Image: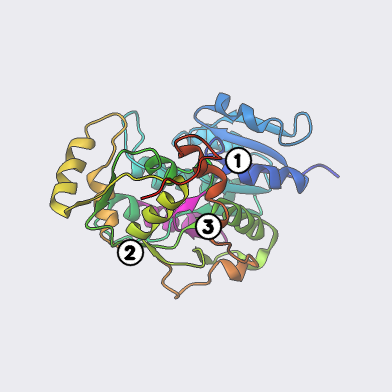
Amino acid sequence: MSQKIATVFGGTGFLARYIVPQLTKAGYRVRIASRHPSKARHLLTQGDVGQVQPVYAPVQNKTAVARAVEDADVLINLVGLLFESGKGQSFEATMVDGAANIAAAAAKAGASTLVQVSALGADASSASDYARCKALGEKAVLRAFPKATILRPSIVVGPEDGFFNRFGGMPMVPLIGGGKTLFQPITVIDLADSVMAAVNDSATQGKVFELAGPTTYSFKELMALMQSITYSKAPQVHIPWGVAELIGLVGTALPVPPLTRDQVLLLRTDNVATGALPGVEALGVEPAPIESILPTYLVRFRNGGQYAKASAG
């Protein structure tokens, strides 16, 4: 009996670090499909020799995508952008057209399973291009591959995340709109377990799941939690919405923007589960509190290192 193949798009990113080892442990040969396959070298040790294979497959390139899914049983799409940049890296080209290319190739190749990792707050009528394109990407996937499983995670936290690692070392903590936006962050381990549950259970096919953690926090509360671990005394600075939009407009012109106007639009809407769709528990995953994972990587931001003590005052 030949070994089953799983192709992971966006396989060089944060989430794949936790999903690929589970796939290899389950016996899959894993193709890491990426624009930059050389960045997947760290995953080559997550299985037997030759079990993990990086391949060149930008999601905008239909021919490359077709090669990457050839003979694959399982496809997982983790591709996403935090902000748009040049060279075809727009939300629409990547998260709508790219997702459609993957789904069409999956259907043509006869794949049994497609898991599309979207985002909580995906909304085709959203003012945010990110949220709108995430929703349009879901629709494009389901048109081409109706039995796809859609997973919508809230903010994903873990050692390589782009959220707490972004704010942990800042000399000041920006509270956009007063930091009142609500979030239900989920740990990367719980997200990886949810993806594998979708891979293993055909009853999840054709359904949409909202993946949220057990606790709702305001942005301000998340920053306070972070600072309680890092012992940071950085001041929390209120940034009115109007000022944030101006910063976003300027930031959009930079190669790596600290903030974009679209991100400001996203922050105007709470990022929490609606309760109208099945959650992480429906996948057999009991979500862990983020407090269980944050200290494992945020201690590096402490002045004096991991064993430093909190200063008085």
- Which residue matches tag 3? 291
Q: CA distance from mark 1 to mark 2?
A: 28 Å
Q: Secondary structure at mark 2?
A: loop
* Residue found at the very far right of the displayed protein: 1
Residue in view at x 23 percent, y 36 percent: 251
Residue in view at x 50 percent, y 37 percent: 300
Q: Looking at the rendering, in which quadrant would you find the N terminus?
A: top right
**Do the residues under discs 2 and 3 have CB atoms within 8 angstroms?**
no
Q: Nearer the viewer, mark 2 or mark 3?
A: 3
Q: Which mark is residue 270?
A: 2
In the rendering, at what x and y percent does residue 215 appear?
47, 67
In the rendering, at what x and y percent does residue 291 appear?
53, 57
Q: Secondary structure at mark 3?
A: helix
In the rendering, at what x and y percent does residue 299 appear?
51, 42
Up the image or down, 195 lies above or below 159; here it is: below
Q: Which mark is residue 17?
A: 1
Q: Amino acid at mark 1?
A: Arg
Q: Amino acid at mark 2?
A: Asp
* Residue found at the very far top of the displayed protein: 38
Q: Secondary structure at mark 1?
A: helix
Residue in view at x 44 percent, y 63 percent: 184
Going from N to C along the chain, the mark reached first, 2 or 3, is: 2
Q: Is residue 137 left or right of residue 243?
A: right
* Residue found at the very far front of the displayed protein: 312
Part of the protein shown in magenta:
133-157
Taking depth in this image into account, of 49 and 248 the one nearest to the observer is: 248
Going from N to C along the chain, the mark reached first, 1 or 2, is: 1
Going from N to C along the chain, the mark reached first, 1 or 3, is: 1
